[in-house]
Image (tube, helix red, strand yellow):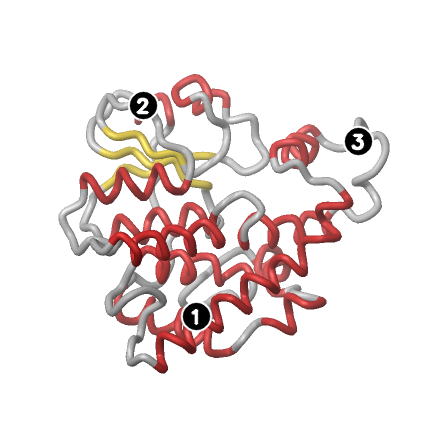
């Protein structure tokens, strides 16, 4: 994938999407998948993991990704703000049900997957807890600047890391029960009878527990190893039916292989 620099991108029009270079970061992959279904062209903008990203910050006020900038409107950072922007400017099938009850269910599932203390957040805590085992308590001044910034940005604390596997497990159990209920009612999707943002969010974030095969997701080997290292109640709660659902969503609705 070709990336523009933030300095160049801020002079362009249309949708600019800041994405982490070289890795299938789930929040970014979800935003890209939403754009694919909604038939939105965008300019990828480089965000570098662990770096200061000063030029991106000078433009958007944010050092992390994804960030969506449409025309001369303010940057969108949160998963829901990005979803609502894509819904507004896209021309493909809507990814939010028109029925208010189903819409609330879809957004609620999205929050459990993408939101603070949700699936992605908690799974990231598990990964960072393993990476920095023994360094989360006490003085962090000896850590490299990028590592210290990452731990601070994501508020990684030992007690939160300890709670994360059960939180991941609880969300996995909810999604598996939801999928089984939908299938029993004759639906092949997590909400209603059509593809929604909920299915796309699960497809993107499922790579944090079982990455797509190398041919479809040529991610760095060390990142794949971290994603595959699922343990404790989270590993016990991962229902194969959820991965089968993920695979079908990619096969029927999204683009493979992933490009990042």
- The residue singled out by tag 2 in the image is 74
Q: Is residue 251 above or below residue 186?
A: above
- Give coordinates of residue 87: x percent, y percent: 23, 44
Q: Is residue 104 left or right of residue 90?
A: right
Going from N to C along the chain, the mark reached first, 3 or 2, is 2
CA separation, marks 1 and 3? 41 Å
Badge 3 crowding class, 10 Å Cα cut-off, few under 14, some 14 to 19, many 20 or more, is few
Residue at 35 percent of width and 47 percent of height: 31
- Give coordinates of residue 89: x percent, y percent: 18, 39
Dot 1 falls on a residue whose secondary structure is: helix
- The residue singled out by tag 1 in the image is 178
89 and 108: which one is in front? Answer: 108
Residue at 40 percent of width and 66 percent of height: 216
Which disc is residue 140 wearing? Answer: 3
Q: In this rendering, which labeled residue sits more in front, label 3 or label 2?
A: 2
Q: Is residue 252 above or below residue 67?
A: below
- Give coordinates of residue 171: x percent, y percent: 54, 61
118 and 202: which one is in front? Answer: 118
């Amino acid at each position: 994938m070709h990336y523009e620099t933030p300095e160049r991108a801020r002079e362009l029009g249309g949708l600019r999407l800041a994405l982490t270079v070289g890795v299938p970061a789930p929040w970014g992959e979800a935003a890209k998948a939403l754009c694919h279904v909604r038939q939105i062209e965008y300019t990828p903008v480089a965000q570098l993991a662990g770096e200061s990203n000063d030029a991106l910050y000078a433009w958007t006020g944010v050092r992390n990704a994804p960030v969506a900038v449409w025309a001369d409107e303010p940057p969108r950072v949160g998963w829901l703000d990005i979803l609502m922007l894509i819904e507004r400017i896209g021309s493909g099938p809507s990814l939010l049900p028109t029925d208010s009850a189903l819409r609330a269910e879809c957004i609620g599932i999205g929050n459990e997957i993408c939101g603070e203390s949700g699936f992605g957040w908690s799974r990231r805590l598990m990964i960072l807890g393993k990476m920095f085992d023994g360094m989360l308590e006490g003085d962090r001044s000896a850590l490299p600047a990028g590592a210290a910034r990452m731990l601070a940005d994501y508020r990684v604390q030992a007690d939160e890391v300890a709670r994360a596997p059960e939180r991941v497990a609880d969300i996995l159990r909810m999604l598996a029960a939801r999928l089984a209920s939908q299938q029993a009612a004759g639906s092949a999707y997590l909400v209603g009878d059509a593809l929604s943002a909920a299915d796309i969010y699960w497809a993107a974030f499922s790579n944090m527990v079982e990455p797509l095969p190398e041919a479809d997701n040529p991610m760095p080997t060390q990142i794949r190893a971290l994603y595959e290292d699922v343990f404790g109640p989270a590993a016990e709660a991962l229902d194969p039916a959820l991965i089968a659902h993920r695979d079908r969503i990619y096969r029927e609705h999204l683009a493979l292989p992933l490009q990042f």
